[in-house]
Amino acid sequence: MSMTIPAVRPSSLPRVDAQALGTLYDTYARQLFRLAYRLLGTREDAEDVVHDVFVGLPEALAHYEERGRLDAWLRRVTVRVALMRQRSRERRREISLHSVADVPTPAGLTPEQIELQAAVNALPAPLRSVLVLKEMEGYSHAEIAALLGISAVTSRVRLYRAIRGVRERLEDHQ
Amino acid sequence: MNTDLRTKLQELPTPELPAELRERIRASSATGEQTILPTDAEPHRRLIVAKVAAAAIVLLALSWIAYGRLGDRDRDVPSTASFFAGSPFWPTPALSQEIATGDTVGRARYPLLDRVAARALQSGSWSYRATMTTDGLVTTEQGYRKFSIAPMTVDGVPALAIVTSGTGRYSPEGFTDSLLVSRDSLRLLRRAKRYGRNPGGMDFPVTPARYLSWRDADINWVGSVYRALFQLTPLNSSWRGSVYVPWVTYPSRVRLLAIDLRVIGSERITLPVGTFDTWVVEVRFRNQEAPRVYVSKTQGLVVKIAMPMGEDAVWEQVLTESVRS
């Protein structure tokens, strides 16, 4: 989905009220939640990311320039918040409490999807981020490079290693 | 990527958006809770950065002008030509003993290599293949190097021609660097450099002195110093040594760059040209990580040079051909 919303330009709407925020939530929360979940692998973390994004949105929108699509801007912001949370989580070593491969996955998955989800969850965070952004969210390597602060070549290499890691794990379980 | 795998990844379901999340956000907003989002750089911030950069450039330009007017400090420093005139073959492991200057970049950590056996240099030619490998996966060709030592005479004086040639990223059309040195003292008699389409190159001695850059030095450390030095210097497991090489950053300004070398281990290396038991020599300058040189234990032959390039890449030269004459 894509749309521009001149209504949130600072000149026309300097303050985003509760109703406007509710409209934005109804429009974008689902896709942003999905994006955060794919990046972080847990429902709780994805909830927190969406929470932080929408709580910070009124202030952030005051500086938003309508130079691109709002949904693309929101997705970039969500990716950054998710990556910040990921780094924070790694610093606190939360992930060491359990294997990332054992993180609960959504109900209703086929056995093949469970294996695939586990293989993605088992990837190191840097590889998983590139895999999600490139193959599941459709970002270009240049965009990923800008988001992650790496080179486009590094992004390609990480994607290669991520795909190889997923395939090896899937083969191990066959 | 396999389209099938991509499709399967995109079809992986995600949990439903929790119904209570909207209420949680509303409650947080109502209590005045705030988060600062990492948004794109704001325009006015970019403007400030641009202004600061412009001011820095102006300041730099003024400093440069002032430096030029106060250039007397360089008056006593020997010119490039006279600097080279007093040295053995360039760059040289014994250079620091002949040049009395305090203008050094870094201090040598280990005993200076001020004694080398000139006669020990053996004639022959050695070819190397250069590559760049990123994250152990992506390898790109970086040209070749050829290093040769041959006996000759210069104006009746027994001499050696030490020639490094090759191609590379900065010289795709090839370069040749020839050092003619006295066979007895290794003192430089003549030097000629040629880069690609630049037939003029550089001859020794050169008047007026021209600018040299780190690229000149880099090529010659790799091309001559390691290969010649390790033929002349027997290594062992506790070997340490430092050299100074000239770093000419301005026609009238010669600085000496300290390079610290030490054996950090041994390794058996198998290459297409053969298997070698080598000493692994770590090379450091200005506290930066620099090449590791793998030197064969029996012949003092450099069989591999590996240089880290940033976090994910390594630049390598490996021996592809060795001909002793």
Image (cartoon, coloured by chain):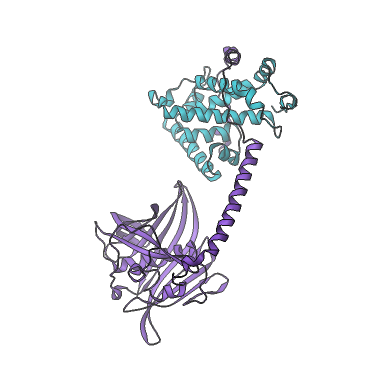
Chain colours: A cyan, B purple
- Residue at 52% from the left image edge and 75% from the top image edge: B208
Location of the N terminus of chain B (image quadrant): top right
Q: Nearer the viewer, residue B49 or B225?
A: B49
Q: Which residue sits at x=54%, y=44%?
A: A151
Rendered view: B210 above or below A158: below
Q: Looking at the figure, which quarter contains the C terminus of chain B?
A: bottom left
Question: In the visual, does A99 lie left or right of A53?
Answer: left
The residue positioned 68% from the left and 29% from the top of the image is: A70
Picture layout, residue B180 above or below residue B70: below
Horizontal and vertical percent for residue B140? 50, 54
Can residue A137 be seen here? yes
**Image quarter of residue B29:** top right
Can residue B266 be seen here? The reply is: no
The answer to whether B292 is drawn above or below residue A34 in the figure is: below
- In the image, residue B188 lies at what x, y percent? 39, 76
Q: Quadrant of residue B200?
A: bottom right
Residue A140 at x, y = what percent? Answer: 61, 39
Marks counted in the figure total 0
